[in-house]
Image (cartoon, rainbow, N blue to C red):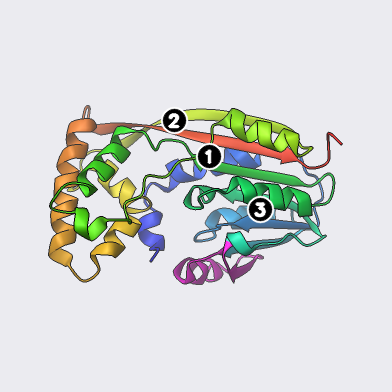
Amino acid sequence: MWDPAVYGRFGDERSRPFFELVARIPAERPRQVVDLGCGPGTLTATLAHRWPDALVRGIDSSAEMIESARALGAPVDFALGDLRDFVPSPGVDVIVSNAALQWVPGHEALLARWVGALTAGAWLAFQVPGNFSSPAHDAVYELAAAPRWKETLAGVARRMAVPAADEYATALTAAGCAVDAWETSYVHLLPGNTADHPVLAWLEGTALRPIRAAFGTDDAGWAGYRAELGERLADAYPIRHDRAFFPFRRIFVVAQTGALT
C-alpha cells in the first residue's frame, strides 16, 4: 500500500527532477498529456498549468494515491490503472512518467510499445532513479538477506535495476526517435535533527514499501528490521552539520517519436 503522506516527505527533493524533466519537453499545444504513475497528483496538476488547453490525465495503480489526487480538485482526469496496460490513444501528444518505470522489470519493451503507438511528433519523457547500487540500497538488501529476515523477505527484497542513459538513448534512437538523455546526481541535504535517520525516512516512502508490506501484521518484526537498518544507514550517512548528505543519481530521457524516420 502506498501512503501519500509518507511518500510526500522531502517533497522539494522529490519534485525537482519532475520539473527539470518537464522543462525539456518543447511541446506547445498538445491535445492530451498523460502522466503515468502520477502518485498523489500534485505534480500532475502542474501539467494543466503548463498546457491549459490540453486534456491532462493522471494514472496510478494505487487507490490511495488516486483518492489523494482527486481530492486536489485540479483540472485533471485521475484514474486508477496499471501503466503496463496503458495504450496511447491517437490524441496523446505527451507522455510523462516520473520515478515509476523502475518498478517495472523489462520496461524497455513498454517504451517501445508506446513509441510505436504514438503519432509522429509526439513526446515521451521519463525519469527513473539510478541509485540502486548506493550504500542505502546495499544496506536494505544485505540486511534483508540476513538469517533473521531472509525467510520473511525472500522474493520481496528485490534490488531494482534500470538501463543507463546511453542505453535508453540507443534503444529509442533505433525506434526512430530524436532523443535527449542525461543523468544528474543530486546531493540532498536531509535534516538530521529528527528521531529517525533521514535516509531511513526517505526510503520508507519508496524502496521500503514492499518490505514493510511483507511483514504484514508482524509489527515487532518490522520494528526490528527498521531499527537495524537505521543503524546501518547512520554508519553509511553520518550526520554532519546537522544534516545527512545523501547523493542520489537520476536518469532522464525526452524523446520525440518519428523524428528520425
The residue lying at 25 percent from left, 69 percent from top is 216
| Image position of 47 (left or right of 122) | left
Q: Which residue is mark 3?
A: 47
* Disc 1 and disc 3 in contact, CB within 8 angstroms: no
**Nearer to the camera, 151 or 39:** 151
What is the three-letter code of the residue carrying label 3? Leu
- Mark 1 vs mark 3: which is more N-terminal? 1
Q: Which residues are magenta?
A: 60-82
- Asked if the magenta segment contains residue 77, the reply would be yes
Query: In terms of sequence position, does the residue under pointer 2 or pointer 1 come before the other?
Result: 1
Q: Is residue 24 above or below residue 143?
A: above
Residue 126: give x, y in percent of width and height. 61, 44
* Mark 2 in CB contact with mark 3 (< 8 angstroms): no
The amino acid type found where label 2 is placed reads Tyr
Q: CA distance from mark 2 to mark 1?
A: 9 Å
| Mark 3 neighbour class, 10 Å CA radius: few under 14, some 14 to 19, many 20 or more | many
Q: Which kind of residue does numbered mark 1 sit on? A: Pro
Q: Secondary structure at mark 2?
A: strand
Q: CA distance from mark 2 to mark 3?
A: 23 Å
Question: Which numbered circle lies on residue 17?
Answer: 1
Which residue is label 2 attached to?
Answer: 186
Q: Nearer the viewer, mark 1 or mark 3?
A: 1
